[in-house]
Image (spheres, rainbow, N blue to C red):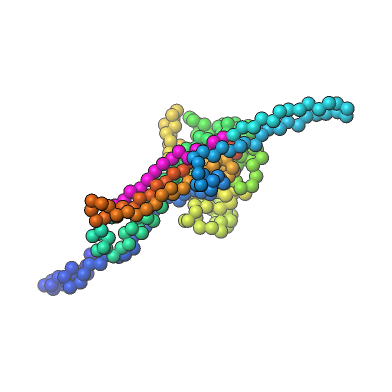
């Protein structure tokens, strides 16, 4: 809106004073992606070279036996198993920019679109993975009797989700972490929670920033800090679920070890081409990726809702 004019003064805005378009766009706010921080990507390099399936060998089980001096030993045949990481997700972008628009614009339209595509794809991939792994936790790491050794942690069930308030936010996370640790998982542990959970956590006894020990940017990574020795992330990429028993809106918060989930992604092709039927450019990007819970024993889930 131009500056107001006194009565009888001629209009100059748009006549003597031109309208200007700034060359930078206002950023669209994209939700922070957490999956790059919680997934193992060790097979990504090989899959980028060739192939669409990685056969991952699982660690075998061995048996310790009691013996006596002079007693013949009894051998057990070692059984090996594997799981597959399949690259089966395919998406693409194809955006057209007309030549006249590009030429007459002060903004770098092609660069803007390339950046937006990258951010949009990161968010969409994150949402897909979080929805896909939500129910992938091991049987001993979910439900009302979680804990492979103690069966003593209630992490919520359908019809009886854990109600999270500022008074219960910390305890419920610690229960999930404790159930995870009963699998002997120790280093490289992570957890993630919805943004509303993070809000309640911040108003709990952990409301002081130095308690979380954060030395990284929450805005950039979603990292809240360390809680009980576990890197805790905040994300808004959850898909809420409606409980089939009581119709409450519920969420899956999770904790795990980096080896629990494998993820591989590549920008298969990216190009800018001139169209044949008009003077325009098409920005095209082809994305392929795959993910899987390859070790559910190291993935714990808290089924919860906001109180």
Q: Is 46 or 25 nearer to us in this picture?
A: 46
Residue 82 position in % (x across, y down)? 59, 34
Q: Residue at x 18, y 69 (%)?
A: 13
* Range covered by the magenta-colored residues: 83-96
**Does 258 sit left or right of 250 as displayed?**
right
Q: Magenta stretch mostly in which secondary structure? A: strand
Residue 216 position in % (x across, y down)? 54, 58
Residue 174 position in % (x across, y down)? 59, 43
Q: Residue at x 58, y 51 (%)?
A: 226
Residue pushed farthest left?
8
Q: Is 102 or 2 nearer to us in this picture?
A: 102
Q: Is residue 15 magenta?
A: no
Q: Is 281 or 210 nearer to us in this picture?
A: 281
Please identify the quarter of the rendering in which residue 6 is found. Answer: bottom left
**Does 257 sit left or right of 121 as displayed?**
right
Q: Residue at x 27, y 52 (%)?
A: 275
Which quarter of the rendering shows the N terminus? Answer: bottom left
Q: Residue at x 37, y 53 (%)?
A: 271
Q: Is residue 93 magenta?
A: yes
Please identify the quarter of the rendering in which residue 186 is found. Answer: top right
Is residue 14 placed above or below 272 in the rendered structure?
below
Q: Is 103 or 228 nearer to us in this picture?
A: 103
């Amino acid at each position: 809106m131009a500056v107001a004019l006194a009565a009888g003064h001629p209009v100059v805005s748009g006549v003597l004073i031109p309208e200007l378009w700034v060359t930078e766009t206002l950023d669209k706010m994209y939700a922070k992606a957490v999956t790059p921080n919680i997934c193992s990507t060790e097979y990504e390099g090989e899959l980028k070279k060739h192939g669409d399936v990685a056969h991952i060998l699982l660690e075998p089980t061995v048996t310790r036996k009691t013996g006596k001096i002079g007693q013949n030993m009894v051998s057990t045949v070692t059984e090996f198993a594997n799981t597959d990481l399949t690259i089966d997700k395919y998406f693409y972008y194809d955006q057209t920019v007309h030549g006249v628009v590009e030429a007459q614009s002060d903004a770098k339209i092609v660069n803007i679109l390339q950046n937006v595509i990258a951010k949009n794809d990161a968010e969409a991939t994150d949402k897909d993975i979080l929805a896909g792994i939500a129910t992938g936790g091991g049987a001993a790491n979910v439900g009302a009797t979680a804990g492979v050794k103690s069966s003593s942690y209630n992490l919520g069930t359908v019809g009886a989700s854990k109600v999270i308030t500022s008074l219960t936010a910390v305890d419920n996370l610690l229960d999930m972490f404790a159930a995870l640790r009963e699998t002997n998982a120790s280093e490289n542990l992570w957890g993630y929670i919805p943004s509303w959970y993070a809000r309640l956590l911040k108003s709990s006894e952990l409301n002081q920033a130095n308690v979380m020990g954060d030395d990284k940017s929450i805005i950039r990574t979603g990292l809240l800090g360390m809680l009980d020795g576990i890197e805790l992330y905040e994300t808004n990429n959850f898909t809420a679920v409606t409980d089939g028993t009581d119709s409450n809106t519920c969420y899956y918060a999770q904790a795990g070890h980096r080896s629990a989930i494998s993820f591989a992604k590549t920008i298969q092709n990216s190009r800018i081409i001139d169209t044949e039927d008009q003077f325009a450019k098409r920005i095209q990007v082809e994305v392929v990726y795959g993910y899987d819970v390859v070790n559910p024993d190291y993935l714990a889930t808290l089924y919860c809702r906001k109180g």
